[in-house]
């Protein structure tokens, strides 16, 4: 993900990486360190099952572009709500960086109609052609290169953690 955002030629000095909840802070902090950006966190709570209230932003996003980092997007409701909260707190362009895109129910439509500028997701869960046809905002990145290097590491009996370090720092 870091390699993708760096390859876009974006001015990272005007970016903040955001975790959409407290539980994803470690993941977001890692991307923020790689990109050289500050970190912010959306403070939310679940008053009842399947219901989320995003209440506040910990950190400064006003006048900044943001990259919201999460591991999974299922229905998109929580993520879209967090992005809207960031917009309400003065964020400019909003990007997302998601590992697994489940995209159940009307998730793609929610994303397409949201304030998200670009939704970046890996191909760990394939998108159907029908889903792809419904969006101009979703960019799918392949994990193939990383998996090939992991297979090589296993075959060569070298640490898999070295592969993660390669992708975390050099974008190789």
Image (cartoon, helix red, strand yellow):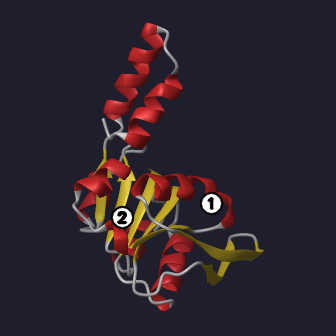
Where in the figure is residue 41, as x and y percent of width and height? 60, 71
Task: Look at 49% across and 9% down and name the residue there.
Answer: 157
Q: Residue at x 33, y 32 (%)?
A: 144
| Element carrying mark 2 | strand
Quarter holding the C terminus is: top left
Label 1: few (<14), some or many (≥20) within 10 Å? some
Say which quarter of the image contains residue 166: top left
**Residue on which disc 2 sits:** 119
Q: Is residue 25 above or below residue 109?
A: above
* Left/right of residue 45 with respect to residue 41 in the rendered view: right
Q: What element carries label 1?
A: helix
| Residue 96 picture quarter | bottom left
Question: Would you say residue 51 is visible in this rendering?
Answer: yes
Q: Which of 58 and 135 is in front in this view?
A: 58
Residue depicted at x 58% and y 78%: 59
Residue at point 36%, 80% (across, down): 113
Q: Is residue 96 left or right of residue 142?
A: right
The residue at the far right in this view is: 47
Label 2 vs label 1: CA separation? 19 Å
Q: Residues within 10 Å of mark 2 (few under 14, many from 20)?
A: many
């Amino acid at each position: 993900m870091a390699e993708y955002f760096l390859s876009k030629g974006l001015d990272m000095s005007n970016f903040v990486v955001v975790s959409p909840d407290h539980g994803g802070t470690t993941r977001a902090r890692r991307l923020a360190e790689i990109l050289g950006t500050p970190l912010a966190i959306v403070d939310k709570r679940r008053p009842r099952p399947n219901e989320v209230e995003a209440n506040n932003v910990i950190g400064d996003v006003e006048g900044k572009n943001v990259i919201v980092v999460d591991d999974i997007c299922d229905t998109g409701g929580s993520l879209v709500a967090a992005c809207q909260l960031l917009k309400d707190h003065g964020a400019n362009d909003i990007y997302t960086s998601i590992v697994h895109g489940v995209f159940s129910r009307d998730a793609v439509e929610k994303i397409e109609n949201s304030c998200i500028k670009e939704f970046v997701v890996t191909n760990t869960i394939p998108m159907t052609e029908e889903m792809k046809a419904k969006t101009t905002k979703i960019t799918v990145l392949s994990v193939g290169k990383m998996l090939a290097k992991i297979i090589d590491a296993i075959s060569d009996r070298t640490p898999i953690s070295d592969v993660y370090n390669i992708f975390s720092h050099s974008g190789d």
